[in-house]
Amino acid sequence: MITIDSKQIKLQIWDTAGQEAFRSITRSYYRGAAGALLVYDITRRETFNHLTTWLEDARQHSNSNMVIMLIGNKSDLDSRREVRREEGEAFAREHGLVFMETSAKTAANVEEAFINTAKEIYEKIQEGVFDINNEANGIKIGPQHSPTSPGGLAGTGGQGSAQGGGCC
Amino acid sequence: MISGIQNALKNAIDVIAPPATPLQDFTYHWKQLMNFYVSHLTDCKVPVQNTNIPRHLDVLLEILLQEEKEVNEPGPCLEYLLQHKLLDLLATLASAETPPGMRTVCLVFLRKLLGRSKYPLLHHASIYAPIQRLVALCNGNPPSPIESEEVQFLLTICFLVCKYPHVTSIINDAPIVQTTSNSIKKENEKTEIQKVTYVPTRRRNNSNPLFEPLDTQAVTLINPNLFDKEQRRLLRSNRSFKTTASSQGSSRRSNESISSREESVSSSPLAQKSVCDSPSIDTKSNEQWKEKRQEDSSGNKIDEHLQNLRDLRLDTDCNAYDDASYVAVDNQSLKSSPCIPEKSKCLLLDALMSYLNSADNTVRIRACEGIMVLASLDDPSFAQTVARSELPSIVTIRLENLFNAIPAHVDHLDIYNVDVTWGLDSPLWTKEKKFPGCRQVAAFFMWFDYCDQLIREAQTEFAETLARTIRVMFFERIVTSALVDHHVVLITALVTKCLKEITSPILCTEVSYWLVGQDRDPEIPNVWTSPVLHRLIENCFTDSNDLTVETLKLFEEAIDKRNEHILHCLILIYLSTRAYYDNTAADSAIASWSDEEDEREKEKKGFLDLSYEQNHSRTLAPSNIHRVINCFLSLMPRYLQTDCDVNNYEKYMPAWERQYSLVLSDCALMAWPLEAVMVDDSASSDSRPEADHCSGRFYMGPFLSMLFDKISNMPRQTYEVNLEVTGLISRLALLPHPYLHEFMLNPLLPLLPGTKSLFLCLQKVIKQLVSEIPKTAESKTMLKETRLKLLGDCSQEEEKENILYESAIVTEEFCKDLAAIAYVKYHHSI
């Protein structure tokens, strides 16, 4: 439950497994999600390299207006960094995502990541991009006319499920 | 820099006082854990949380994971764990629940160990055997208090199976009773061999058979001719391993023999041993099967080869290590063709299935996830196992139960708004009371969504089996009969919603079989071959306005699926011979109808320049399009028109434009013909059609007949029905099928005398309207008011019945709709 614009917004968040083999489930969950967090591990280059396929998958199986955040996780392990911050930013710019680096361990930016996602979704609702009367896009209006979004999808871009779970 | 100093410091300390090695730590904690049992031999009623067991297990886990991080190959602690069969013992303790709560603790420990370890540990006999026992322990039926932990554990195993697909074998469990004795013997052999040869050597590397793929098929395949081969196997075994006499003796008492094996590890908790040992027995028998099958399929020559290999293995044992998979991998090359297993059971799948009816939403969804993962596993033999399991019927029975649980009093109009997906929580529908019966309806559609998604994601064989099961057990057995009972309106609405929600082509195909039958031949007039279609069409002619509307909606949804089979059986098969077309008229009156036909004739003559502009259908884009449009627009006499601007049909075009692009892409793969031409073009056909066609043999099929009846009856029908009928016909007219197109949208087409067409029906309707609506200023105002009421936003209070006026408005707009569609299609085809 977070508050944006003095409106209560309830986020429903799913942590999907980042493993290739779980794609069937992830695909199933993309439907009806309003937002997704694509998480990679800044200390492992291969998780960054996998982003493209995850992004394609997300775009293909979801509402085209789905908000996608790009998250570089484990920012506390700067010494073992393999993916530079600029690379993440560039990738996000190229694909129209919002970028952040977080640390699930120190909780740095974790809440912000979710709040930013929610804000982004909220703005899209304000702009009328999401039709809140059509529930297929994963946004439901609560009893007091506060939009609730069940659509937080935490896709972990190739991260181990244990770490992925840590940030949610 | 700082870390460098820290390291140096640590090294210095280590030199002065070397810390206990991880292995020492590991064994210490293990022994401490075991001490509990030594000191509580008789009294094990202390809850596990009050003991030190969880803490010791945590430390053990930590040491193991730490070891993995530091060393690149399996370290001594892992070796110890494998060699001394610690997990076997834990599984025994878990199954015995000693002390109470031990099961949960063990499940957590194993889940974390397996989930986090970077090695595919599941191959190893001393890991998968206990895992299998634990999997067999997990059963959601009856619900267990720790089901959420159980299902998480199962999901972790699913995850491992996905990650290392070659381990599917170990989650398979061959249900063989006859081979128990043999397998036990084999097991004992193996145990013994391992005891002797298992060297915790540093020589492990990536090529270590422990971590090499175990061939799945080889392990899961089961020979149908069990007993016969069994004898041979026994004989051979006796030959190759001369020291098995004692183990054979013990094998007759299977449980005890396992106990004896475990006695080598520990002694105290064995009194608690339960029947849960059987899975481990079966694991071994899997191994057994593998080898046996290979012998069977490959014949004697390979038998000998295998024998050599086995001997060879004994030799290599002395040098290094032994593992069953080693043989499996080697033998893989010998295996020629995999045979099909008769019946195979998967423990993991069975366990997961038992949670499908769990009352706990989360538990059920986890089980659903696990099943979806297993069903989508790309392993042909395993896919077959899943397809032949009970899963399809369990899933379908749940669907049936949820369907039957929907209260009869649910308002059919509420159904359409329900929007749920299987995995995402939808508190709006499942918790709140949007309408009476909302929760049950939501539960049904959540499950239906799961079925649909499962079929979408699963391997083809299972997907097809499940879809077929749903058709036969749910649609044919339950829904068909419900289409006649009291709540038929609600049932029809539910079916429509189901159709709407289907996304998987395989399920769609099966449902289309249910709807229109599997037979693709045309029906003979008044002889019904498809009971469901028959029923639905009859339902359109009942007195109930609601039922008619709902059934038409169902048809609309069916058309919208753009399923080839549905379209074929409902409509296209009747039109594809072009039997409605009057050839004689075409010859004599060619000037009067269109120039498209002679254009086409010309093209036919110069058939060789086929490559030129073949993507554009001349049927859909007749050059006399303006005349076609005019026909529709001038149908309604001026004085009945309430819309002053005749060309107002253009306002409908953008919407149809959008729809048509979608329709085109959906229908692109249907292999529909490009042009409407006579099927038989030879000269003889020109002379014969009288015999064939003029006798009025053209039959447009039950569906189009029904629609045309409904159109003709427009002045007598309610606004809702008329809206549905016209909407449905517009959708049909939009389809890019040349015959359907010209039949619906070309009023200039010469038709056989007596053939009903959309245009003729409309002409009749308008004639009726003209004769019934008086030509007075008063009725003109009435019409305008009705128009405002229907098309405008203002919701005036309900006036008295004016079906006639409403029909006039609908007809007027419908004509514009048709004109718009004709133009949109023309525009796309030029």
Image: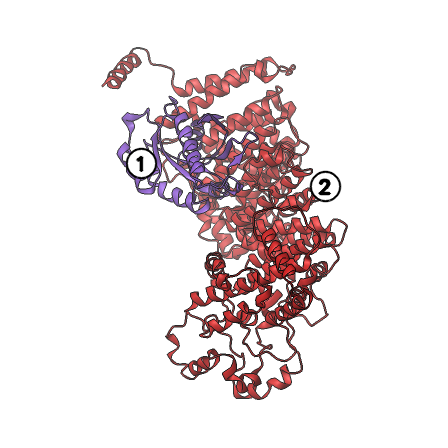
Q: Quadrant of the C terminus of chain B?
A: bottom left
Distance of label 2 from label 1 (alpha carbons): 55 Å
Horizontal and vertical percent for residue B279?
60, 36
Residue count near mark 1 (Cα–Cα under 10 Å), binned few <14, some 14–19, many ≥20 = some
Q: Taking A74 as reference, is B465 above or below it?
A: below
Horizontal and vertical percent for residue B561?
56, 56
Camera-side residue: B526 or B424? B526
Colour that chain A carries in the picture: purple
Horizontal and vertical percent for residue B284?
56, 39
Asked whether, in this view, residue A48 is left or right of residue A35, the answer is left
Regarding mark 1 in the picture, which secondary structure is present there? helix
Q: Disc 2 marks which residue?
A: B407
Please, what is the three-letter code of the amino acid marked with disc 1? Arg
- Residue B176 in sight here: no
Q: Quadrant of the N terminus of chain B?
A: top left
Please, what is the three-letter code of the amino acid marked with disc 2? Pro
Camera-side residue: B375 or B720? B720
Regarding mark 2 in the picture, which secondary structure is present there? loop
Q: Disc 1 marks which residue?
A: A45
- Residue A66 in sight here: yes
Can you tell which chain is drawn red? B
